[in-house]
Amino acid sequence: MTQVDTAPSNFIRNIIDSDLQSGKHQVIHTRFPPEPNGYLHIGHAKSICLNFGLAEDYPNALCNLRFDDTNPVKEDADYVAAIEKDVRWLGFKWAGDIHYSSDYFEQLYDFAVELIKKDKAYVCALDAQQTREYRGSLMTAGKDSPFRNRPTSESLDLFARMRAGEFAEGSMMLRAKIDMASPNMKMRDPVLYRIRFAHHHQTGDKWCIYPMYDFTHCISDALEGITHSLCTLEFEDHRPLYDWVLANISIACKPRQIEFSRLNLQYTLTSKRKLHALIEEEIISAWDDPRMPTISGMRRRGYPAAAIREFCKRIGVTKQENTVELASLEACVRENLEAHGPRAMAVLDPVKVIISNYDENKTEKLIAAVHPKDESMGTRTVTFSREIFIDRADFREEANKKYKRLVLGKEVRLRNAYVIKADQVIKDDAGEITEIHCSYDPETLGNNPTDGRKVKGVIHWVSAVENQAAEFRIYEPLFMVENPAGAENIHEVLNQNALVVKHGFVESGLSDAPAEKAYQFEREGYFCADNKDSSPERLVFNRTVALRDSWGG
Ligand code: ATP
Ligand code: MG
């Protein structure tokens, strides 16, 4: 029994295949273990697609969602809710109930007591400074703590009293007794528990000692019967400790930790801590700002979940550190929307066109395809009238032959409507064009009429009598440099054009455009209604992605 044929293979799937073939495992069980200290970002999407994707592809396999919540100071229930929503939106389902590492605090405590009883852990009273000094460096061995050989009974008593709240924060800790001379710094008597008088979003004020990540993670995995514990490369040197803890406590399940490389993306920060800093420094006001590489930001911007999944599939899973081009993420979004995004017309920088030979009292409901290549998406009606708006950039008083739009004295075809000819321009005192007077040919209705006219240019338009005013938010990457994480001062690499706001009009049919659903505004790009700021009274559209790649991919 191996994976389904359509799944792209990778070194982790190869390991799993051989574990199934050898009979080491009958069923695969993975987990996605976010710490609820921020919102999920595109890097997490890679891990989600990997872990939940394995569960989907292998027979009877499961993937847990577990909140790795051992640091109450930085965590919050709001983050828990946002993470659940994001995983579900990406299209994945976790096995059974949601898990929390904090569910296991009692068991973790018991395992810690077991380690003390086996003389594998001790209560240490060195302060932070001393602990650092005793740990040594990569070049020099560490020194044993003076508390290392205190009697087991003493550590047991002190550990119980730590739990009971008798000692101040930082005055005591529980440490594993491993090897202060180990070349792996993580193995130099790592801290297992510390004192924190902090309220926890799940356990309230029940605990004042909290287990450390390295102690908690492996035990949580084992308690849940995880077979393959997948994490990013920075955990490679934690693996001996992961295995040490499980080898020294009474637990049968021994999950295997496997590391893969993080996703790094051009022009993008993929670290919750750094994204958090953008909010703290008021560079960005919210985690779901469409300029953020968070899942909620991308959703708000109109990225389809399927496009993010496709991106994660294309980048693959390896142990190689690399940086993925932003263009490849945008290409996945664009390909999805090219195929599935309904078409509509919007004018972002409007100038009025008056069609002098069109009846003043007349409007027409013209029929247009919702998608030119997908008839199943049906048709829509677009109102045509004597006065319309076109984009300022689509008109010139004079132009050479390369300019295939409206030119004074020349013809252009209006998308889904008629051929018009520009006869005259009206300007204000400042010389700005306020009206373009045109005439239309009633025999030219439709996009591909057999009118035999050689009109090359086609431009989009919106009726000036039946439309919806709209705000358009045009986004570019938040940073001007490919590797913003390497910038000394983040303020210096901010892209001042990351958000540009325009005001114009959309087809009247878009007054109830559902939020987050991207349309192709013909010739302008893909846009979706904003899920916070848009309402039928005040439409706000986010540009999801431009029509073409402009990032040199
Ligand atoms: P950050 O550095 O953004 O805070 P983290 O690793 O601390 O990330 P967690 O909430 O602990 O965040 O991550 C949950 C899971 O997502 C972990 O297994 C982690 O390895 C994985 N993950 C986090 N960032 C990335 C990334 N850029 N690429 C792939 N996987 C990632
Ligand atoms: Mg982490």
Image (cartoon, rainbow, N blue to C red):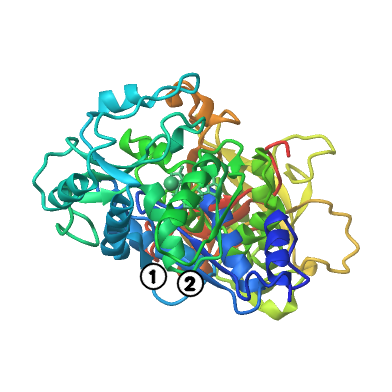
Q: Judge from the rendering whether residue 495 lies leftward or rightward of residue 18; answer left or right.
A: left
Rendered location of residue 78, percent (x, y): 30, 58
Q: Seen in the image, is 205 located left or right of residue 38?
A: left
Which of the two residues, 359 or 501, is positioned nearer the viewer here? Answer: 501
Query: Badge 2, how many Cα within 10 Å: few under 14, some, many 20+?
Result: many
Q: Is disc 1 in contact with disc 2, using a CB cutoff of under 8 Å? A: yes
Residue 496 is left or right of residue 518, and the answer is left
> Residue 496, image x and y in percent?
48, 30
Judging by the rendered image, the residue that carries numbered circle 1 is 98
**Vertically, is 284 above or below 42?**
above
* Quadrant housing residue 145: top left
Q: How crowded is mark 1: few (under 14 residues within 10 Å), some or many (20 or more)?
A: few
Can residue 538 be seen in the rendering of this structure? Answer: no
Above or below for 25 versus 312? below
Q: What residue type is labelled 2?
A: Trp
Q: Specify the quadrant that holds the C terminus.
A: top right
Inspect the image, locate mark 1, and give the three-letter code of the amino acid beneath it. Answer: Ile
Residue receiving disc 2: 94
